[in-house]
Image (tube, rainbow, N blue to C red):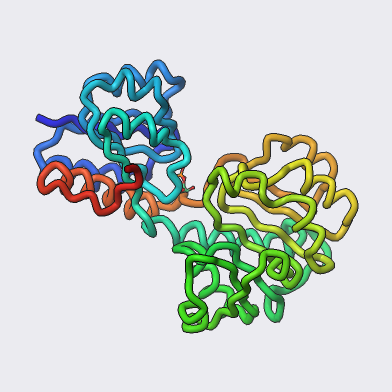
Amino acid sequence: MKKILVATEKPFAKAAVDGIKKVADQAGFELILLEKYPDFNTLSKAAEDVDAMIIRSDKVTQALVDVAKNLKIVVRAGAGYDNVDLDACTRKGIVVMNTPGQNSNAVAELAIGMMIYMARNLFTPGSGSELKGKTLGIQAFGNVGKLVADIAKNMGMKVIALDPFVSDEMMKERGVEPVHDIKALYSASDYLSIHIPALDSTKKSIGYELATLMPKGATLINTARKEVIDEDGLYKAMQERSDLKYVTDVAPDTLTAFVEAFGKRFFATPKKMGAETAEANINAGIAAAEQIADYFKTGNTRFKVNK
Ligand code: 3PG
């Protein structure tokens, strides 16, 4: 009997776990649930003899791969897989997959909610502003970016987007104006929502230069990864420009400095919560379980992300 470990330091909603269990039962797998685990040792012990793992932002490192002798497949229930050492998995022949699109709506709704929260002074007394009529720039027009664009357009925002991998036609079909230069994107955006992955080429790519291009009173929204921000550069930009705001679903490493310096111009969620909805948990969790069942049954590697 194959063993599937659901290792979620940040647990799924119960309905998602129930759904995963149902898929596992139907496929004849044993399901092991490890939630809110305290440390690597607990995780590695649980992973020792499992055939498959479902994870969220949980780290799959070389050390874990070394311990998990039977591991054949890891599915990240979500979009970003920067928490998985792909090379370590590839070397051991372990297939790594994600579940693209399954939690995108939750993240998109949070991005919009964060814009409103900042526009309304963190829901404290005083006159705020509206999103209607403002320009929203979207950096990367993938699953989340597209949904953010749809909602924003319906709220009366003008939406522009930059994505070298998406055609102008596709953007125009969704009523979005394509932009081909990052400086032009930042210069024109009252709100700028970041949806790029954390890659070597994107890490620390957003900082002083881009932030200071933004129009007066602009807000930067980060529901992607903290690593894409050059924190020192952004801090400097916000010090020089007392009109700039930054809201992020991923607390910066220098959180205290941002909190102390910028008051209501800055907000970070205490824990990453973009995908923290029952719907997203159910969609991504069950998709992950189904992908594992399908992989063992038919060899389907459609969502494989390593070589
Ligand atoms: C993702 O990459 O899918 C999101 O960042 C969600 O991450 P989480 O599953 O840890 O909430």
Residue 154 seen from this side: no
In the rendering, at what x and y percent does residue 56 appear? 40, 40
Quadrant for the C terminus in the image:
top left
Quadrant for the N terminus in the image:
top left
So how many labels did they put on this image?
Answer: 0
For the residue pair 17 and 108, the one nearer the viewer reads as: 108
In the rendering, at what x and y percent does residue 106 appear? 47, 58
Q: Is residue 297 left or right of residue 224?
A: left
Residue 204 quadrant: top right
Residue 173 seen from this side: yes
Residue 136 quadrant: bottom right
Above or below — where is 263 with respect to 74? below
Q: Is residue 125 left or right of residue 20?
A: right
In the rendering, at what x and y percent does residue 28 appear? 9, 38
In the image, what residue occupies the spot 59% across and 49% down? 202
Q: Is residue 129 left or right of residue 224?
A: right
In the image, what residue occupies the spot 40% across and 20% down? 63
Q: Is residue 39 left or right of residue 193?
A: left
In the rendering, at what x and y percent does residue 124 appear? 77, 57
In the image, what residue occupies the spot 35% across and 20% down? 44
Residue 192 quadrant: bottom right
Above or below — where is 91 with respect to 145? above
For the residue pair 82 and 23, the one nearer the viewer reads as: 82
In the image, what residue occupies the spot 44% across and 63% down? 143
Above or below — where is 294 with respect to 132? above
